[in-house]
Amino acid sequence: MNELINSNENSQNQLRDTMDTEDLNVCPECGTPNPLYDSSRGEFTCMNCGLVISDHIIDSELSGRRSFSAEEKAKRETKGSPINALMPDIGLSTVIDISKTPNLSHRMRRIFKWNTRMSWSKRNMLIATTEIKRIGTILNLPQHIKEYAAKIYRKAFAANLLRGRSIKAMVSAIIYYVCRVEKIPRTLQEIIDVSSVQPVDVRRCYRTIIRELKLSVPAIDPTILVPKYIAALELSNDVEKTALYILKKYMKMFPVGGKDPKGLIAAAIYLAAQHHGEIRSQNRISQTLKITEVTLRSRFKEMQRLIRLPKPGEEQK
């Protein structure tokens, strides 16, 4: 903490000299003097109560300093905010502000008019990025997942894969692909439920981006979905451990490619729940995982016949 304070003393003094505000010297909440300046975030924070006194401060520490090598020049260059893949223009467009210049010439008014018009490509990206952010917010997806999906959508749009296809269906298919690649426990049905598109359209778009963009098809790991359904069925941690043990044993014995992972998960949870005496009906499990009871019973019979569960006290390897 002392080293961080010492390293930031010069930048704090420079900022206080350039800013004509006295609120940065004392915390308004607890009255502690000399708040800490975080140059990476551009914030003044109180070291006592943690209150952020001021944020989004422009860093002028590197302005006016000479550089004697390419490395120093790269470190001292300031080019504004970083680009954002979730913005239709990636944050690189320029907006003409006419609020401060009301007396514009006829030529400038025409320039402003054409600057505000949006082409079809920008309108398409605006709709797509808005849909990506909406689905990502509902499904609580991380920021890097949404940015990855936006990058793949740009590739699909550049390859003219949107002709004759729905934007929402393409966005849903791309989000499903990204979740599979990054091992995010989200199923296709969950994405379809929040996207209001037909499942057949999403599957067609998924096959199209895999084929045309030459993407590698990631294999689904059923084990990453087990904790989610264990919580939905209100089962204990012992049942979760046993279900994971059953799934890993089954995947070592048989290839699971082409089989519905939710069917395997449902059978493993049903068998583990019976083993620990926490009975859940086949109907409740099938409705929770949104599969048929026939699928559950067929996978359950396979696992029950081929996998021996350890007795109480034995280790699950």
Image: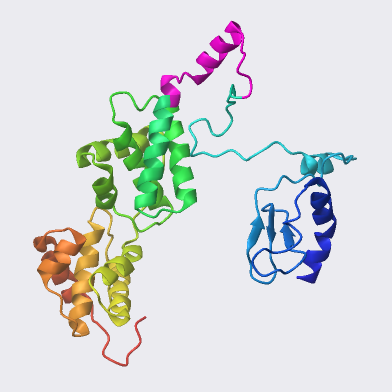
Q: Residue at x 29, y 78 (%)?
A: 242
Q: Residue at x 45, y 32 (%)?
A: 155
**Residue 190 vertical placement versus 233 (above, below):** above
In the rendered image, the quadrant that contains the N terminus is bottom right
Residue 51 is drawn in which quadrant? bottom right
In the image, farthest residue toward the bottom:
313
Q: Residue at x 36, y 36 (%)?
A: 209
In the rendered image, the quadrant that contains the C terminus is bottom left
Residue 126 is drawn in which quadrant? top left
**Residue 117 vertical placement versus 240 (above, below):** above
Q: Main secondary structure of the magenta part?
A: helix
Q: Is residue 312 left or right of residue 122?
A: left
Q: Position of residue 175 (x, y in %)?
A: 37, 45
**Residue 284 vertical placement versus 103 (above, below):** below
Instruction: In this rendered view, identify the residue nearer to me: 291 or 254.
Output: 291
Is 102 colored magenta in this rendering? yes
Instruction: In this rendered view, identify the residue nearer to me: 149 or 30.
Output: 30
Q: Position of residue 26 (x, y in %)?
A: 74, 63
Q: Position of residue 144 (x, y in %)?
A: 49, 49
Q: Position of residue 59 (x, y in %)?
A: 75, 46
Q: Residue at x 23, y 64 (%)?
A: 264
Q: Is residue 19 left or right of residue 190?
A: right
**Residue 61 vertical placement versus 36 (above, below):** above
Is 236 colored magenta in this rendering? no
Colour pattern: rainbow
Q: In this rendering, does residue 252 appear at all?
A: no
Instruction: In this rendered view, identify the residue nearer to me: 171 or 30.
Output: 30
Q: Which residues are magenta?
A: 100-122
Q: Is residue 116 left or right of residue 225?
A: right
